[in-house]
Amino acid sequence: MSSSLPRHSLATRTIHGSLALAVMIQLGSSLVMRHAYGDRPGNIFFPIHEYAGMIAFALALVFWLTVIARRIGTAPGALVPWFSAARRRALIADVQSYLQAARRFSLPAHDEGGAFPSAIHGLGLLLISYMALSGTVYYIMSLFGLGRAPVVHLLMELHGLFGNVVWAYLIAHAALALLHHVTRNLPLNVMWSLKS
């Protein structure tokens, strides 16, 4: 049974929630947006997508600064464990514990400093950071008439491709949060608490 106290600082939870909301607006608007092209008019959802993307970029930047500056919470190196042999070993061991638990149709006890959840959160933050950065670069380059430059075109091709990965990440992330809730491993009211 989980403690009723929040496991992350209020700043971390607020930024995480704000970034999640911006990403959901991005994904929702991407389904119905239409960019003006030649004679074809755009629609209101494209500017919504652009502005929410720039907000997401600012939030991702603040999130990274918070992760780097905070004294309590997941260490930055745990979010990107690929550069440390010890962290990679811890990640492999943690993945194995998750696989063993999955064979028993259960979850390991929630570990705030667990290597696997930390690495997954890090991958998500890197993915969202790329999406927000590439969209912001496209917006700025378009202001200068360079939206069709080859490097910008490549950034946006990857932006579209990774958009599908963001959908998968969001669905899996939300599903795991619900799974933690129903197994009483980490209730949603603790994850989304506004307690400081």
Image (spheres, rainbow, N blue to C red):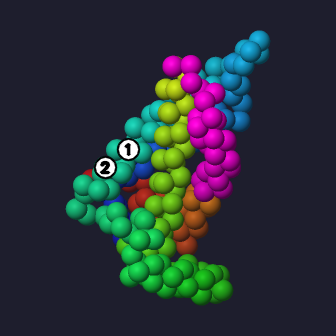
Along the line of sight, the residue nearer the viewer: 171 or 139: 139
Is residue 129 positioned above or below 26 on the image? below
Callout 2 amino acid: Leu
Magenta residues, dominant SS class: helix
Q: Nearer the viewer, residue 175 or 90?
A: 90
Mark 2: few/some/many CA within 10 Å (<14, 14-19, 20+): few
Query: Residue at the right extreme?
Result: 39
In which quarter of the view is residue 176 placed?
bottom right
Verify whether residue 148 appears in magenta: yes
Q: Is 107 above or below relative to 64?
A: below
Name the residue carrying label 2: 65
Label 1 is placed on what type of residue? Leu
Q: Nearer the viewer, residue 19 or 151?
A: 151
The residue lying toward the viewer, choosing from 44 and 196, is 44
State if disc 2 and disc 1 touch (CB < 8 Å): yes
Residue 129, magenta (yes or no): no
The residue identified by callout 1 is 61
Q: CA distance from mark 1 to mark 2?
A: 6 Å
Q: Position of residue 91 (x, y in %)?
A: 47, 78
Question: How would you rate the neighbour count of disc 1 (Cα within 10 Å): few for under 14, some for 14-19, many for 20 or more?
Answer: some
- Residue range (magenta): 144-170
Q: Is residue 195 visible?
A: no
**Residue farthest toward the top in the current orientation of the protein:** 39
Specify whether 36 is left or right of 106.
right
Q: Residue at x 63, y 49 (%)?
A: 162
- Residue projecting furthest to the left: 71
